[in-house]
Image (spheres, rainbow, N blue to C red):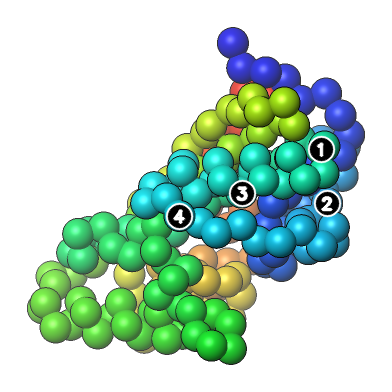
Amino acid sequence: MTRKFTGDRILVATHNVGKLAEMQQLFAPHGVTVVGAAELNLPEPEETEDTFVGNARIKAHAAAKATGMPALSDDSGIEVEALDDAPGVYTADWAETPNGRDFLMAMTKTHKLLEEKSAPHPRRARFCATMVLAWPDGHDEVFEGRVNGHLVWPLRGELGHGYDPMFQPDGHDQTFAEMKPSQKNKISHRADVFAKVLKGCFE
């Protein structure tokens, strides 16, 4: 039996502004106020696991313990079939530079690797998201979501964040970066996992 969330404020354990805005939009209809980790000056814990669920657990428990609030974290990334599901859990690492994250660099690297392998089209990929809701007493609930699609080049669209300009979800003729946030938020990997979080802990 999953534990239900009973408060009206939830800490989202992320320092990513795009992700926080997406979560605020998703929670808005449910009367839950979303507080971000950066607002509370929480440090970013070291993500030392090699799975989405492992890293999401680290972030959620660190935030819940530090604040005494229930904390929701997600770990997400893109898995490219022709690259043996890389970058996967290392999606953000592929974008790391001394001056912050550069996803244009990461997408260019991904495209270059696919070209070097002469990977056939369509170049199948999936966005994966794992969410962990942790309570200060150490209890947690785990949920997983995904969306399948293929990669495009050249990049298309100015909206979204991360790999959005490169990813075209199945059944659509636009990339995530060409879609309005309201449209993307209905079909994204985060929407999929978020629906499961709501059903499990909020309804």
Label 1, label 3: how far apart the Cα atoms are: 13 Å
- Which residue in the structure is indicated by mark 2? 35
User: Which of the two discs, 2 and 3, labels the residue nearer the N terminus?
Assistant: 2
Callouts 4 and 3 close, C-beta under 8 Å: no
- Real-space Cα distance between discs 2 and 4? 24 Å
Callout 3: SS: helix
Label 2 or label 1, whichever lies nearer to me, is 1
- Nearest to the eye among marks 2 and 3: give it: 3
In three-dimensional space, the C-alpha distance between marks 4 and 3, rounded to whole angstroms, equals 11 Å
Q: Which residue is mark 3?
A: 59
In which quadrant will I find the C terminus? top right
Lower sequence index among marks 2 and 1? 2
Left or right: where 106 falls relative to 103? left
Residue 77 picture quarter = bottom left
In the figure, is residue 3 to the left or right of 103?
Answer: right
* Callouts 2 and 1 close, C-beta under 8 Å: yes
